[in-house]
Image: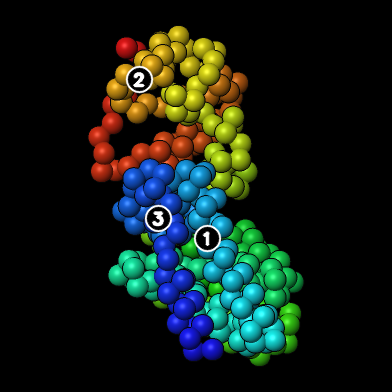
């Protein structure tokens, strides 16, 4: 068992978010956006490909320990949790990034869905209710994680699972602060979904689009189309984003929340360490 614990600590230390973000975009994820080496920031820094590959990698850190416990330790619950906890420690305190690890949320989610599914739904409800009352995702996350061992004990009456929840809460609290709160950092859209998630799932709803992805003159204007022509034909053009006409049309219709949505999208796209040029309309 000790050998497997060490192996899964090393496996848990593999920074999939860093690896895939660097492969896809050449970016060091711990220097960008929320600076968290985790799934959400992998989507932000590396895009959809890096994000989904990171989800698969981080999920395996819970699934592989469960498979090993099943085939080598007669599916023993305590052993399963010890191996998962070893992988989680590797994720949060990796040997490869000098301790710049994630919080192991994906590992926890898969563990709960497989071993204690009811607790997963209860904890989601706890977070939702906390956020409704406080309006603060940071406090809501703290409340959710403080309640983790209690919820596990109530829903499963399992001492091993409850102790696992307690240890996960301790790990979470030691790693978590407001700067790593990705929901707060990105701000929530009017439908309650982080803008990064909305962009991935409903790209057509964005007011601001990458010029290379703008496919219709009606979205961006003919001068933007001319600039896009240069991009697609190999000319070196500064990375450009365009605010489509839809935002202006909705604003004229009295939808004042458009301004807030635009601000959030701009905050998501920009980096305070990089200078930008803002012009009324893109031109050659």
Residue 76 position, x and y percent, is 67, 87
Q: Residue at x 61, y 78 (%)?
A: 68
Q: How far, Cα to Cα, is label 1 from label 2?
A: 34 Å
Q: Could you classify mark 1 by the number of other residues whose Cα lies within 10 Å: few (under 14), some (14-19), or many (20 or more)?
A: many
Write down the residue under mark 3.
Answer: 19
Secondary structure of residue under mark 1? helix
Q: How far, Cα to Cα, is label 2 from label 3?
A: 28 Å
Is 193 on the left-hand or right-hand side of 17? right
Between 100 and 87, the residue placed more toward the observer is 87
Residue 109 appears in the figure: yes
Callouts 1 and 2 close, C-beta under 8 Å: no
Q: Which mark is residue 57?
A: 1
Q: Residue at x 41, y 62 (%)?
A: 15
Q: Could you classify mark 2 by the number of other residues whose Cα lies within 10 Å: few (under 14), some (14-19), or many (20 or more)?
A: few
Give above or below for 2 relative to 18.
below
Quadrant of the image containing the C terminus: top left
Q: Could you classify mark 3 by the number of other residues whose Cα lies within 10 Å: few (under 14), some (14-19), or many (20 or more)?
A: many
Residue 173 appears in the figure: no
Give above or below for 91 relative to 208.
below
């Amino acid at each position: 068992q000790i050998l497997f614990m060490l192996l899964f600590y090393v496996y848990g230390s593999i920074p999939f978010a860093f690896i895939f973000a660097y492969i896809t975009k050449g970016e060091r994820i711990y220097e960008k956006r929320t600076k968290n080496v985790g799934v959400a920031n992998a989507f932000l820094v590396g895009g959809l490909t890096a994000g989904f590959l990171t989800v698969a990698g981080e999920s395996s850190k819970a699934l592989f320990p469960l498979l090993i416990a099943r085939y080598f330790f007669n599916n023993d619950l305590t052993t399963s949790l010890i191996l998962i906890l070893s992988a989680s420690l590797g994720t949060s305190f990796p040997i490869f990034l000098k301790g710049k690890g994630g919080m192991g949320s994906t590992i926890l989610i898969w563990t709960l869905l497989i071993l204690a599914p009811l607790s997963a739904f209860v904890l989601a409800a706890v977070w939702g209710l906390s956020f409704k009352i406080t309006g603060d995702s940071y406090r809501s996350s703290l409340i959710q994680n403080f309640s983790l061992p209690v919820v596990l004990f109530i829903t499963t009456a399992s001492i091993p699972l409850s102790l696992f929840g307690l240890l996960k809460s301790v790990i979470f609290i030691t790693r978590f602060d407001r700067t790593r709160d990705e929901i707060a950092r990105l701000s929530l859209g009017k439908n309650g979904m982080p803008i990064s998630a909305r962009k991935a799932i409903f790209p057509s709803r964005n007011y601001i689009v990458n010029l290379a992805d703008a496919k219709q003159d009606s979205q961006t204007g003919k001068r933007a189309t001319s600039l896009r022509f240069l991009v697609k034909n190999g000319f070196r053009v500064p990375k450009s984003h365009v605010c489509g006409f839809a935002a202006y049309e909705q604003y004229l219709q009295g939808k004042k929340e458009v301004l807030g949505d635009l601000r959030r999208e701009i905050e998501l796209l920009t980096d305070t360490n990089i200078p930008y040029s803002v012009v009324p309309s893109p031109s050659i």
